[in-house]
Image: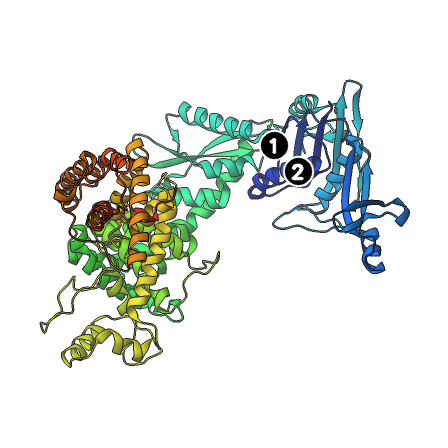
Amino acid sequence: MPDLLIELFSEEIPARMQGKARDDLRKLVTDGLVEAGLTYASAGAFSTPRRLVLSVEGLTAESRPVREERKGPSTNAPAQAIEGFLRSTGLTLDQLERRADKKGETFYAVVEKPGRQAAEIVAEVLEATIRAFPWPKSMRWGSGSLRWVRPLQSILCLLTDETGAHVVPLEVDGIKAGNTTEGHRFMGNGRFVVTGFDDYVVKLKRAKVVLDTAEREAAIWQGAQNLAFASGMEVVPDPGLLAEVAGLVEWPVPLMGRIADQFLGLPPEVLQTSMKEHQKFFSVRNPKTGRIEGFVTVANIEAADGGEVILKGNQKVLAARLSDAKFFWENDLRVAKAGMGEWVEGLKSVTFHNKLGSQAERIERIAALAREIAPLVGADAGDAERAARLAKLDLRSSMVGEFPELQGVMGRYYALEAGEKPAVADAARDHWRPKGESDGVPTEPVSVAVALADKIDTLTGFWAVPDEPTGSKDPFALRRAALGAIRLILANDLRIQLATDKPFPESEVIQPGEFSPFEFAYLSHLDLEQPNRLRSYYWTERDFMKVISKAGMDPYNHYCKQTLKGFEKGNRVADLLSFFHDRLKVYLKDQGVRHDVIDACLAMPGNDDLTLLVKRATALSETLKTEDGANLLQGFKRANNILSQAEAKDGVEYSFGADPKFAETDEERALFTALDKAEAAITPAMQAEDFGTAMAAMAALRAPIDAFFTAVQVNSDNPVIRRNRLNLLHRIRAVCSGVADLTRIEG
């Protein structure tokens, strides 16, 4: 069986595109080979800045012959139908077979395709792959029609077997496949011949090219650590930067330099971000001081002077970049020490969304909501409101204008410089978090209050517009915001009813906590005086709600008629809660909790308390994994089906009056006893939210329910006995349904 080696050699491929390009090359070629009738043992794809490589081992030498039969129209069919069938098969009428069947005589086409040599198939598949390769961006050059990420210079395509290496005959836009390649752009020695993958890898390394991306990453990281260790320093880990740099060099040579003393006073995040974004440098930290004092750059060449000239040039560029950063930092500190009033005014002219107002208006909403949420998370309401008012001010800073990824991080520094409490400053930094799956979740109460307020305000705002996500489109990252809020609630074990309506107050003054966070945030977006406008301040809405309530009107319905043109406030809040539940399903699915288990718990009261919901779902999931839990589910469904059918047939509900004195068998009496015991255990356990105990008590019903159905006929001829047994089945349903809606569980 031959081995296949493909190399597509070009000008530099952007590092960010290389990983997907490797996967695409492997998939497109191997799928094409298999579809054409070839099989293979293994395939591996590789990349460097100037080449994409595919190695396929154990490829079959030729495809198998194929005999295909296709049924056609009846021999009595119209001529047009027969002619269409002939065109689709490529045969003539005399080549068709006539076969008798139940409806008469029918035409059949028998097409025999002989096996094809691997070289022919490889050439066909590779040309199609090259011409249709899914680069995010591609270009044309010269007079040809071929598009590639950068000009394609050569194609290496070899089939190697026991007789030697053979070039696959292939030409794409004037580029003929061959058996040669070249090494490093500067340290290589021109083109050279290869005979297979192993020979290719060895000769590339001699020509100063490391083919495997993982090997380049390992060399970069090990070299950087060695240089730092020799100076008593340590490299700051950055997997993303490591992967990017490995895609920029073919022969990595790490070099270490020092940051000038005049820049060491900059925050470490500023140094790291500037060096990473502008120059792809790794930061080097002094473990004794925690300061960033050096950097590691990765050259693509072994310089005769050991890299001195390279380092000198890099340090010159770095000094210019850090001079800019130092200017931004000093200018921002001046504003921060003056109280940041300049930034407060500046945010009034920054539009958050054309229907949701400015960033300044948004801050007012978040501050009010953070104050409402604070008691629910154990935070000081004043600190939470203050932190919310400061959290987004760094958007107007020069540093964040240059490096948007430092939002929040710089806010903390500026808040501390302004004399704010550490907890308030930390909340300004953490209110963005968690930004993604790998990001940590804030745990300090003030930070949690502001982070939740920020995400809930964003979500309720776009629901109020409305402009919620549809399909796969989510331009405002609302799914990420919802998942962030979910993680905040669960990680901190918060007990918040997000959307439960509170009774409207009778007192003159509306007290905190009388609306759920969703309701509070939702109402704060709406302008009661101008029907089609949204606003920022909540107190006007509160006053209006209070006034029309005292007038004996339904505040929500009146509110809807005047402002939302038929969209009821309660329905919009319910829609948002449903959106949260969908995100929660995705989150729990990754943790092994089935969607139907979550649905069974969502059907229970209090489903807007996500912590309670997850505890219930986790306990139910664990119970159903046990033998007793799985068998109990079957017993419950049997009881529920029999009961539902009887109620539908009789037109009555059997929900009261099950009496053990009418029991005729020991199994029936045992079930009465077991249900009494289960109810006695489940009721206090559910009140205490001890779902594990409640589920265990429910699972203990498995044996008596099984025994009951084995020994007892529910639909007895005696109507009194039948009614008593149906009422007993209702007790089974009621006891189990008090824990979760088991009718929603599949299987």
- Quarter-of-image position of residue 468: bottom left
In the depicted view, which residue is nearer to us: 505 or 142?
Answer: 505
Residue type, mark 1 in image: Glu
Q: Quadrant of the N terminus?
A: top right
Tell me how far mark 2 sits from mark 1, CA to CA.
Answer: 29 Å
Q: Position of residue 100 (x, y in %)?
A: 80, 45
* Residue 277 against residue 161 in the figure, above or below: below
Which type of secondary structure does the marked residue at label 1 adopt?
A: loop
- Can residue 328 be seen? no
- Where is mark 1, residue-wise? 250
In the depicted view, which residue is nearer to us: 623 or 470?
Answer: 623
Residue type, mark 2 in image: Asp
Side (left or right) of 24 relative to 257? right
Q: Position of residue 109 (x, y in %)?
A: 81, 44
Q: Which of labels 2 and 1 is toward the front?
A: 2
Which type of secondary structure does the marked residue at label 2 adopt?
A: helix
Q: Mark 2: give few (<14), some (14-19) or many (20+) Cα within 10 Å.
A: some
- Where is mark 2, residue-wise? 31
Q: How many marks?
A: 2
- Can residue 365 be seen? yes
> In the current view of this chain or complex, which residue is farthest to the left?
507
